[in-house]
Image (cartoon, rainbow, N blue to C red):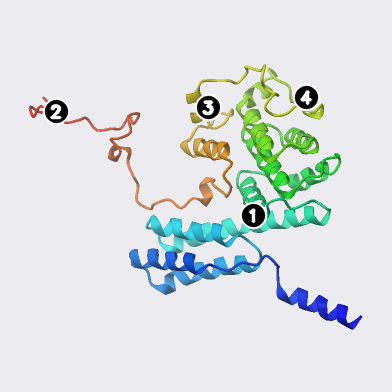
Amino acid sequence: MRNIVVSLVFALSAGPAWAESLSPQDREEINRLRTAQGHSPEDINPLLEQVNKAGERGLPVELLANKVKEGLAKGIEPKRIDPVLRQMTSRLESAHEVLEEAKGRGMAEGSRQRALETMAEAFARGATVDEVRELSRLSQEGRHKATQEELAAGAKSLAVMKEGRIPSKDGTVLVGEGIKQGYRSSELLDLGREVKRRGSDFEEGRASLQTLRDKVSKGERSNRLFRDDHSGSGDDRDRGERSDRGGKGSRNDSDRDRSDRHEQSGSRDRSDRIDRPDKVDRVERPDRPDSRDRPERSDRSGRGRD
């Protein structure tokens, strides 16, 4: 009995088995960027401390270190990097919490790193902890034994659907059905993108979420769900430039769609981006042929303009 108690105390004091620390390479790169930008070590130490403490809690250090490097490379003041890093850490902590809950109910890990990053991005894009818990519950009703990575992909798929004005309850049930049917992570993400792209069709009754759910429940795979459906389809320009079917168009949302297609993880919403403090006007980008603010070209013949 005594040996069991001693072992338990040792395990608790040792911290998470997956605890990480800032690598020498990352530390060296951050210091190089700090020096190049003229910052003192005292300016950067709070950021490094944040990253190390997050690593002690089992959060992905490399992802956070990259955010610090990104900010420094852009010439951002460390005090402006700090709140972005804190927000990113908070989302990773929430992701860690719900994934551990799912693991406690018997859910397999899959790729823990990818699951953490994808879940954090799901939260950044509008998914909630309660929605993820419901997805976790639904996933256990089927024969397929879902992984944390699939749960995270399902949460991100739901968040993407909500961007297309799909009601949370309907989206949760649809994604939950996909998880129960053994949809892979990539299939769940595809489902979210396709539903988002047709958001106005579902909203205005030209398409039915119930019909879609029935197809999924019968084992129809995601790449066949919309094969005969031409609603919401558009040319490539529309797919890239339309951020959602709710009428909000922006370059940021277009970037997020591109990140979805490549299944990249990590939070990429606007609140996690570190923008350069000085404004960059489009007149400084004459290489963009679609820029309406491009200045008039000078007359190459040397005669000038009237």
What secondary structure is marked by label 2?
loop
Residue at mark 3 to residue at mark 2: CA–CA distance: 37 Å
Which residue type does callout 3 highlight?
Arg
The residue positioned 64% from the left and 33% from the top of the image is 190
Task: Say which element carries label 4.
Answer: helix
- Label 1: which residue? 113
What amino acid is labelled 1 in the image?
Gln
Check if mark 3's residue and mark 4's residue have beta carbons within 8 Å. no
Q: Earlier in the sequence, mark 3 or mark 4?
A: 4
Proximity of marks 4 and 1: CB atoms separated by less than 8 Å = no
Q: Do labels 2 and 4 touch, CB within 8 Å?
A: no
Q: Between label 2 and label 4, give the one nearer the viewer.
A: 4
Kind of residue at disc 4: Lys
Compute the Cα span from label 2 to label 4.
61 Å
Disc 3: which residue:
239
Q: CA distance from mark 4 to mark 1?
A: 32 Å
Outermost bottom residue: 2
Could you tell me which residue is drawn at 28 percent across and 32 percent down?
A: 294
Tell me where residue 135 appears, x and y as whole percent.
77, 43
Residue 131 at x, y percent in the picture: 74, 44
Mark nearer the viewer, 4 or 1: 1
**Which of the two discs, 3 and 2, labels the residue nearer the N terminus?**
3
Q: In the image, what residue occupies the spot 69% across and 46% down?
A: 152
Of residues 222 and 87, the one nearer the viewer is: 222
Per the image, the residue denoted by label 2 is 299
Residue 226 placement: quadrant:
top right
State the SS at label 1.
helix
In-image side of 25 versus 287 (left or right): right
Q: Position of residue 186 (x, y in %)?
A: 65, 38
| Local SS, label 3 | helix
Quarter of the image holding residue 145? Answer: top right
Q: Mark 4 = which residue? A: 215
